[in-house]
Image (cartoon, rainbow, N blue to C red):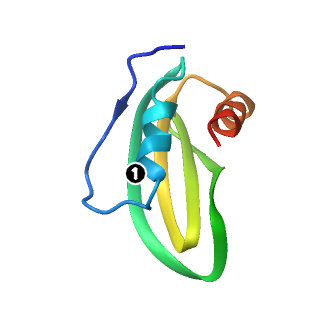
Amino acid sequence: MSSDGRLVWNHSTHLPGLIPILEKLIQCEGISTVTPGRIKTTRSHIPKMKLRVSVPIRGGYKLIARQGKTVQEVFILTILDQSQLEKAIANLL
């Protein structure tokens, strides 16, 4: 289950609890790069961390991480298809 995935640190702020999940995600076979993106706030409140696949991007997928009133984009470069990626995320959460 080990791979050569890497986590890109390009922002100083992240959702609380997101980085440990992403560090586990880069251990999954087929995931090469995980890059947390921008953070926004929303009106609705999600008490527990949620990660969902949003849209395909070139070479992978964009995920939406939500917790509390905060949303963060996460970009994943992978050879996995969407259902395999969703399964890997479900196993982590």
Secondary structure category for the residue under label 1: strand
Q: How crowded is mark 1: few (under 14 residues within 10 Å), some or many (20 or more)?
A: many
Amino acid at the residue labelled 1 = Pro
State the quadrant of the C terminus: top right
Q: Residue sitting at 65 percent across and 78 percent down?
A: 45
Q: Residue sitting at 49 percent across and 79 percent down?
A: 41
Residue 15 sits in which quadrant? bottom left
Q: What percent of the width, then of the height, locates residue 18?
A: 47, 52
State the quadrant of the N terminus: top right
Above or below residue 47? Residue 27 is: above
Residue 84 sits in which quadrant? top right
Q: In this view, does 10 lie to the left or right of 79?
A: left
Q: Residue sitting at 38 percent across and 17 percent down?
A: 4
Residue extending farthest to the bottom is 43
**Marker count (numbered):** 1
Residue 48 sits in which quadrant? bottom right
Q: What percent of the width, then of the height, locates residue 64?
A: 57, 57
Q: Mark 1 points at which residue?
A: 36
Above or below residue 81? Residue 20 is: below
Q: What percent of the width, then of the height, locates residue 23?
A: 42, 35
Q: What percent of the width, then of the height, locates residue 26?
A: 45, 29
Q: Residue sitting at 52 percent across and 28 percent down?
A: 78
Front-most of 87 and 68? Answer: 68
Q: In this view, does 23 lie to the left or right of 53?
A: left
Q: Is residue 66 left or right of residue 24?
A: right
